[in-house]
Image: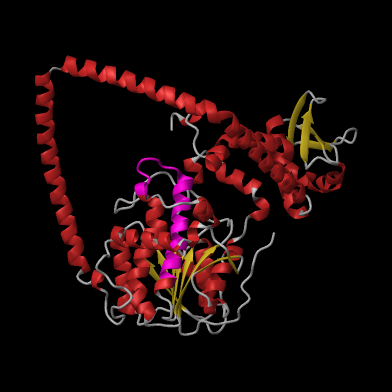
Amino acid sequence: MFSGKCTSSSRLDGKTTIVTGANTGIGKVTARQFYTLGAKVILACRDVRKAEQAVSEIVAEVKGDGLGQLIVEELDLASFASIKRCAKSILQKEKQIHLLVNNAGVMTCPKGKTQDGFETQFGVNHLGHFLFTSLLLPRIRNSTPARIINVSSMAHTRGSINFEDINSDKNYSAIAAYSQSKLANVLFTKELARRLEGTGVHVYSLHPGIVNTELARTVDKVYFPGMWLLGRIILYPLVKTPEQGAQTTLHCSIDEKAGEETGLYYSDCKAKEPSALAKNPELAKKLWVKSMEMVRLNDYDMFNCSGDTLPEPLKNLDKMIKFMEFEANEIEQNFDTQSENEFSIKKNEIILKGKMEINQLYKKKTKLMKRTTATLITTLMTNAKLEILNARDKFIKSVLADVNKELLKLRNHKSHYLAILKQLILQAMYQVLEEKISLILISNDVECVNLMIPELSQIYLANTGMNVEINIDNSIKLPNQEIGGVVVTAKGRKLLVENTLVVRLLYLTQQAIPIICTGLFGPNPTRTYLRNK
């Protein structure tokens, strides 16, 4: 697998850097490298305890001269109040900010809202970083040359900004909401770079790759248990380690050539073309205006105010928060009282008009509306159904063919293949659950599996309490063109479990195709498994 690598030898001595979400994954790797290069690194994280643990681990791992400093600040990007407290704390302590890496994020999580009432993924991934960056920007402008890095994703290419339903209140799709937030990251980068042109502050967005981190921890909750594991199996050749995933962030942060660029989108340490929507300047301006309104910064001029003092939105912050809480409680109480009164009045009106008459009219109109809607839907679906189904089937078959090719390549990575083969053998042995077991293998795997038999016996004994005699059946072999795997038999082949990679792929495919179809083509309301969601 190809993965770009940051080759710059630049150091960050005397520089102040901020990395959001730095307690794990590529954020932690980024913070560790900045620390190694001599920077003061502020780990801005939601969970302070985990951030402090990350600091301890980095200090234990990195030894030598010219190291920097590690500082923890609490930052919950789902709360404007927390963002403002963190920004105020940093600005009161740091005279300069040379590098801001907006790394934290959430991915394909269940439908939810931030503390300020915005859809979780758009609120955390875009609005949270938009507000945080805006509050720190005057100080960053005073610290040039400086850089701002927004970690986006290739998922932005599937995204669009739905200004009519930006919080996904009417129709929520975890994938669509994530893609929208990642497109917003790229558009934010483009517009911020345009507004900062000539100031010495450069702005970057990037795709880190498909990285094995905690970012996808909520995927199983949205779809089904094991979805992330299935994805890692299918995408195994493409999955990066956190160290590999952090390389493009490091490139944008310290590379000399990148320091001459701004407003670009990067992948594998190179500038790449983003989607057509991501390059639309009018869309970027429209999103900027909308974002300023959503974070309530309409009267704040971050490009011309002084960077030596606290910006206006952070002055009297504590008093403002208390006043807002008091005002919210008062509005809630008034709303409850008003709602009660209105409900009582409406109830009396309905009783006076007569329940029977209203119910009959309602039923008649409902039936008419259902008949009209059903007729329209049937007509539209009949005209389009065959063409759509044929296109979907053709695309799914091509995807599965590509997956099969990638699995064939897996045998070229011997250590990875043998680790997977061992797990396949153990899974099949647990299903047979006998003391005498025979293995049917590809000829090329016989020698390696012979060496595994003592380890397999020990693992089987530890997990089942049974001593097992394992033999390789040399009277029959799996075809060499088979991708790999095993057939386990017992009792003279009366018990047989086929656990080859092809069988496993077919089994997982049957479970995953409805979910894959939904992710690629959107929900199909005629599918019964979607109706209870």
Q: Nearer the viewer, residue 433 or 35?
A: 35
358 w.r.t. 525: above or below: above
Q: At 60% across and 81% down in the image, what residue appears?
A: 9
What is the x, y in percent for residue 377? 45, 27
Q: Nearer the viewer, residue 261 or 331?
A: 261
228 w.r.t. 93: above or below: above
Colour scheme? secondary structure
Q: Give the magenta-colored segment's residue range.
A: 164-193
Displayed quadrant of residue 334:
top left
SS assignment for the magenta stretch, majority: helix
Q: At 12% across and 26% down in the image, what residue appears?
A: 347
Displayed quadrant of residue 111:
top left
Displayed quadrant of residue 375:
top left
Q: Nearer the viewer, residue 526 or 220?
A: 526
Q: Is residue 171 magenta?
A: yes
Spot the residue most to the right: 475
What is the x, y in percent for residue 368? 33, 19
Image quarter (top left, top right, bottom left or bottom right) of the C terminus? top left
Image quarter (top left, top right, bottom left or bottom right) of the N terminus? bottom right
Q: Is residue 69 magenta?
A: no
Q: Does the image show residue 302?
A: yes
What is the x, y in percent for residue 185? 45, 61
Q: At 25% across and 20% down in the image, what residue appears?
A: 362
